Image: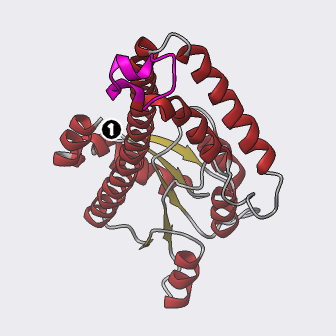
Amino acid sequence: PPREFAQTMRNPSSAATAATILIVDDMPENLEVLDGLLRTAGYRVKAANNGRTALRLAREGDRPSLVLLDVMMPGMDGYAVIDELRDDPATCDIPVIFVTALTEVRDEEAGLARGAVDYITKPLKPAIVLARVRAQLQAKLARDLLRDQNAWLEGEVARRMAENDRIQAVSIRALASLAETRDHETGAHILRTQAYVRMLAEELRTSPRLAATLTPEYIDLLARSAPLHDIGKVGIPDHILHKCGKLD
């Protein structure tokens, strides 16, 4: 809802701090350093020492909000891991930061081209790691909130359109009922006319010349509006409306 969205956007840091981060590195000492640094900063941490384990941890249980991924690993390297993360709908939106000893510009370009959001080189500098982690978590939080806000707005628009649709249908029926009070035969006549209009429109829809115009929505509108065709009777005096002979 808009209120919760606004509150979170005013203080994104507190919401991002509770995030779960997946760290992936084949070197135990690197995992230990990152684990200690991130836990001290208040984050929850998952750790994997190979690509396959990383993919499993990313897909099950408490899915991470961010992945810190080493590039050079035996068996399945970081490039292969991010490719699989991006191909899986369940993990494609998880941001990935490459953490690697590769320092060449082409290496960084290769990682960013595969969908990484940032690139941190080793040896690690704690202040830089935490700053970039915090920035990416806040960016993801903002994206998620905007997505949820858009979904809520779409649902609200659909709800209000359905409500307006019901109000319109009731209003039309109420207006048609006014005509029924002036002429006891009008009630059945209204229902018959409504059925005739729908049947004729559906039959005419088979014509190539009219098929584009007579859509299901258009036919529904025609049938819904048909009861109003006699609404003019409301304004006709009784001595004219109910006169048995010819009108002068």
Location of residue 70 (image quadrant): bottom right
- Residue on which disc 1 sits: 18
- Residue 209 drawn above or below residue 191: below
- Give, as a single range, the part of the protein colored magenta: 233-248
147 or 119: nearer the eye? 147
| Quadrant, the C terminus | top left
Residue 87: image location, x then y, percent: 69, 59
Q: Nearer the viewer, residue 221 or 76?
A: 221
User: Is residue 74 positioned above or below 93 on the image?
Assistant: below
Rendered image quadrant of residue 120: bottom left
Question: In the image, is residue 183 part of the stretch drawn in magenta?
Answer: no
Rendering coords of residue 22 (x, y %): 51, 48
Q: Residue at x 63, y 36 (%)?
A: 60
Q: Is residue 130 left or right of residue 93?
A: left
Tell whether position 234 is magenta. Answer: yes
- Asked if residue 62 can be seen in this view, the reply is no
Element class at badge 1:
loop
The residue that appears at 45% across and 68% down in the rendered structure is: 117
Of 138 and 99, nearer the camera is 138
Q: Is residue 88 above or below residue 177?
A: below
Task: State the count of labels.
Answer: 1
Is 86 above or below relative to 14?
below
Looking at the image, which residue is at 54% across and 18% down? 186
Give the image location of residue 233, x and y in percent. 41, 26
